[in-house]
Image (tube, rainbow, N blue to C red):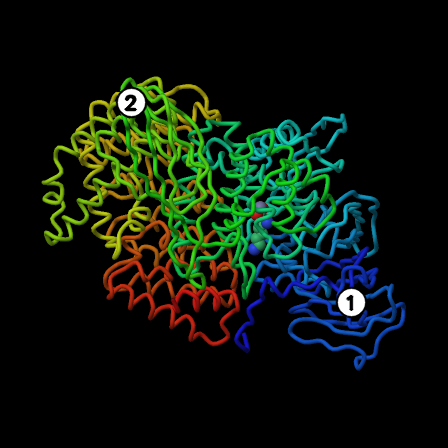
Amino acid sequence: MSEQPQEIRREDYKEPDFIVEKVELVFDLDRDVTNVKSRLFMAANPVRGTGKGDKVFLHGEDMKLLSVTLNETRLASSDFTVDQEGLRFKAPGQNFIAELETQISPANNTRLEGLYVSQSAFCTQCEAEGFRRITYFPDRPDVMATYKVTINANKESCPVLLSNGNLIDSGDLDDGRHFAVWEDPFPKPSYLFALVAGDLACVEDSFKTMSGRDVALRIFVEHGNEDRCDYAMDSLKRSMKWDEEVYGLEYDLDLFNIVAVSDFNMGAMENKSLNVFNAKFVLARPDTATDGDYERIESIVAHEYFHNWSGNRVTCRDWFQLSLKEGLTVFRDQEFSADQRSRPVQRIKDVNALRAAQFPEDAGPLAHPVRPDSYMEINNFYTATVYEKGAELIRMMHTLLGPDGYRKGIDLYFDRHDGQAVTCDDFAKAMEDANGIDFSQLKLWYSQAGTPKLSWQGDYDADAKQYRLTISQKTDPTPGQPDKQPLHMPISIGLLGADGSDLVAKTVELTEASQEFIFDGVTEAPVLSFNRGFSAPVNITTDQPDDELVFLMGNDSDAFNRWEAGQKYATRLMLSAIAAYEANGGDVEAAFADEQARVDAFIAAMRATLTNDDLDKAFRADALVLPGEAFLSEQRKPANPEAIYQVRTALRKRIGQALSDDFANTYHQNASNAAFTPDATSAGQRALRATALAYLVASGEDEFADVAVAQYGTADNMTDQMAALSVLNNLDHPGRETALADFEERFANDGVVLDKWFSLQAMSSRDDTLARIKDLMSHPAFTMRNPNKVRALIGAFAMGNPRHFHAKDGSGYAFYADRLIELDDINPQVAARLCAPLGKWAKYDADRADKMKAELNRILAKPEISRDLYEIASKSAAS
Ligand code: B3K
Ligand code: ZN
């Protein structure tokens, strides 16, 4: 980066002066020098554009420009200008054809944006702004064109040639080359363009749509992986069906392709009819993938498929509107998973993810609204806020409108805007118009950052049989937003009678800073179940007495809040033990001394959950897991990672010891001889058994470590094997080394599976962890050029090992900053994404905070720092 990057501001949006109606691309593929010819059918945009002007600007970066031709006349170099941002020339008229010839080098493209090489295949990633690394183009989502793409390549190394839409021609050329021509009839923005070429195996299936059309479904993978595509294919078919049934949306082409690649900056990409996936979210076989992997594959396949409507048919006007497609599509994939599996378990998972990533983001230096107001690098805004909080916003609309009203709004949205690039306001307007309601206050969720804090006060009047509930809300300032307004949100509540049944169950609408709700006909003093199903994405500051939490854990008709009550109880217990640990100078046993009665009551409630056979096993597994270290750090200021780790570990040990007979029974009763199937019920059984094993091992009894060793050796599926290995991973036990060595040997040539092995070691609580990570960096399978490897080893350390990352001597921070500096020259997007953990310095004691800030400043002093990393590091260091 040669100068300080500019902020791009939402309020500066201008319609394009020129649009492209049609694009014809010809690729002559070569790893080192690929030639790209582009013909753009351009038109002035007098209706919407600002310009009667004749200045044309096309984005372009990191390419060699060979020629510019307008209406068949080649321009002299004095007739155009090229700088770091792109190409400028004078339009020869209102309508004209621009032809551009560029050269790029896919093999040297380590940023993995634009056209690059993964293993031996060529592939592309254009969202958000990668197309401008392929050819000069108005690379902005409000320019939608139809594409015709010709790919020429060596036939032997690239037998498969793919792009968006339909194959309309193919054949042989001279010199061992061949070609294919693809045409996509649906106008699309450049970020949805894709090309794949390589020697790939193909697994094929088909789907009959609701109107009776047959769609060919193809998954392309590296040879040898054909037997790992079944679950992705099945998920795709179920997604297509679900979108027809629940949203009335049908697939619109005769072909849908998924390609799995090993080198990918994120999870997957929804390019029109040619989804490109990180291989780890496609490939699964019982002996290579865990239940968690199966679940993620299902939801990501669905997410990308759902984008065909929410994203592709109706897209974003500009990148500030990103949540228009991402928030909506996340909500859609969450609901799909809830319908396929267990709704409460899904909600628990989604809320856990929201609290683990989005709440901290909203409370830290990078806090931004769901619809941001400015950015330096848009790739930095594919955040938990835009995605997950954006999904919560759609969920609140769904709750407020009910399923039918929501569907009316969705229908109107797609009717009105099919084929257009629109805004979050357009979405909300369709919801309002279809239902005749006013969402102006609700829409503040798009513009106001920060997690609201809610408190409540309940009063029961026995004579009047009336319950009065006062709810108050407040949102703390976030960077650039000192003053916050009250938000509109649905709060689902229940009032439970002594027998555990609901006296009242309803959803109220909070709109004021403080508001009273009155419930009549309440025949006895109730226990309140607040914010059922996490109807609003908020923090609740009111403490409910322990006995009420235990009552809710055992009785709430809302399964989410049964889980939530347990989490609250556990959090409260651990927070007071953490405070005691800090006060007594680090004696973890003494830290629980004053809490014995509460610990006993909590353990009794855990036991009731564990042994309640009426409850779903997956739910029980979730309910037995204590809030994580990251969540606990969010509740403490300053957060002491060592104290948090010690207290949480000690509580797990106590639970393991107290309930060891119950856990042993659970462990044995849930063994299974049946062949592995990835369905939710079987997965729940495995999860409950794994939780039991983890507690047994946590109890500290050696015999249980031996059980884990045996399970590792005899398991016939990856889920059970990983369950065993992850508990052994933290032990000083010879079985640990043997199992890790075995795993390494078995999966030496299997990148996707070996990543689990890297991550486990990075997240180990053992004292030698950082030294081990340093050694692993020279493992033959490790490379900083592969994002999955970087995330597995380096990312997992910072995100999944708070205790060692935050080591008092600063060794974790220094190691991490070195890696980010190294990575920034290879792949700035991934480097920037990984930088966030260092930005959390304000949460820690002065000594740690100084060390973290010093590392951020060292990163900022890097010569030639990327715009991506600069934005995150500078914002993190500043506030
Ligand atoms: N839309 C892509 C994400 C693109 C990220 C660009 N940095 C995947 C998704 O959300 O479906
Ligand atoms: Zn998405």
Describe the element under mark 1 as helix, strand or loop: strand
Looking at the rendered structure, the number of numbered marks drawn on it comes to: 2
Quadrant of the image for the C terminus?
bottom left
Q: Which residue lies furthest to the front in this view?
A: 464
Residue closest to the eye, 174 or 839: 839
CB at disc 2 and ligand 1 closer than 8 Å = no
Find residue 586 and name its label: none
The residue pinned by badge 1 equals 101
Q: What residue type is labelled 2?
A: Thr
Which is nearer the N-term, disc 1 or disc 2? 1
- The residue identified by callout 2 is 666
The three-letter amino acid code for the residue at tag 1 is Glu
Q: Can residue 690 be seen in this view?
A: no
Q: Which residue lies furthest to the right in this view?
A: 72
Where's the N terminus, which quadrant? bottom right
Whether residue 470 is visible, yes or no, is: yes
Report the front residue among 869 and 367.
367
Residue 203 x %, y %: 65, 35
Residue 728 on image: x %, y %: 28, 39
In this view of the protein, which residue sits in the foreground, 785 or 274? 274
Sort mark 2 into few (<14), some (14-19) or many (20+) by Cα contacts within 10 Å.
Answer: many
Position of residue 830 in the picture relative to residue 847 (left or right): right
Image x and y of residue 355, in percent: 39, 45
Quadrant position of residue 260: top right
Disc 1 CB within 8 Å of nearest ligand 1 atom: no
Q: Distance between the residues labelled 1 and 2?
A: 66 Å
In the depicted view, which residue is nearer to us: 838 or 153?
Answer: 838
Q: Quick one: SS at disc 2?
A: helix
Residue 621 figure quarter: top left
- Residue shown at the point (69%, 71%) measured from the top left: 86
Question: Residue at the spot x=58%, y=37% of the render?
Answer: 302
